[in-house]
Amino acid sequence: MRRMQLSGSIVCAGLVLLTGCAEKAPEPAPVVEAPAAPAPAPVAEGAFLDPNTAAREQLLSAPGVDSTLADALVAGRPYANMTAVDAVVGTKLTNEQKDELYSRVWMPADLNSASEEEFLLIPGVGDRMAHELEEYRPYDAPERFRREIGKYVDSTEVARLERYVTIK
């Protein structure tokens, strides 16, 4: 009897071992889809597209930019300033269309080093304002810009112009 119990125990142990060692069918690997190319980051309302970093698709959303101009802007990178951007835009757009474009695509002009030509690219800036922007150099803080330019235009226009400039 003892022998049967021992034999039964050995058989049970063998079955447990065999069950544990049995190969399981491999589970299929999860399907991982390749990530889509990231969409260009949305641009905040009123924010400028930087011509050095904006995606082609973002440039195409700017006024007056067709695929030819978007490709030319991307190919012309990097730009030191807006005068260089304007050289690419060239005669493809009228002055009115350039004003619309530069109200969306812009890199700030340095108040202390920008040329009069670059200041004149700021939508709404004429010869007189370009002269005033140069006359008050050097600018050491935005407050000086606001104070000096505020002599010629109201605070709303000062705030609008301030978006187009920087102090380096």
Image (cartoon, rainbow, N blue to C red):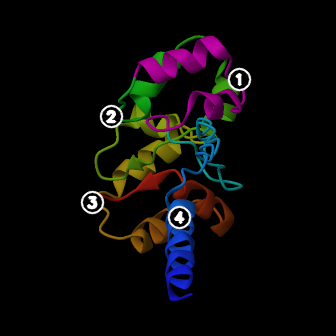
Q: Where is mark 3, residue-wise? A: 138
Q: Where is mark 1, residue-wise? A: 64
Q: Is residue 100 above or below residue 132?
A: above
Q: Is residue 159 left or right of residue 17?
A: right
Q: How far apart are marks 3 and 1 (CA)?
A: 35 Å
Q: What element carries label 2?
A: loop
In magenta segment, residue 53: yes
Q: Which amino acid does label 3 sit on?
A: Pro
Q: How far apart are marks 2 and 1 (CA)?
A: 22 Å
Q: Where is mark 2, residue-wise? A: 80
Q: Which amino acid does label 4 sit on?
A: Gly
Label disc, if present, on residue 20 of the rendered structure:
4
- The region drawn magenta spans 51-76
State the residue at coordinates (61%, 11%). 68
**Sooner in the amino-acid sequence: mark 4 or mark 2:** 4
Crowd tier of the residue under label 3, counting other residues whose Cα lies within 10 Å: few below 14, some 14–19, many 20 or above: some
Q: How far apart are marks 2 and 3 (CA)?
A: 20 Å
**Sooner in the amino-acid sequence: mark 2 or mark 1:** 1
Taking depth in this image into account, of 80 and 152 the one nearest to the observer is 80
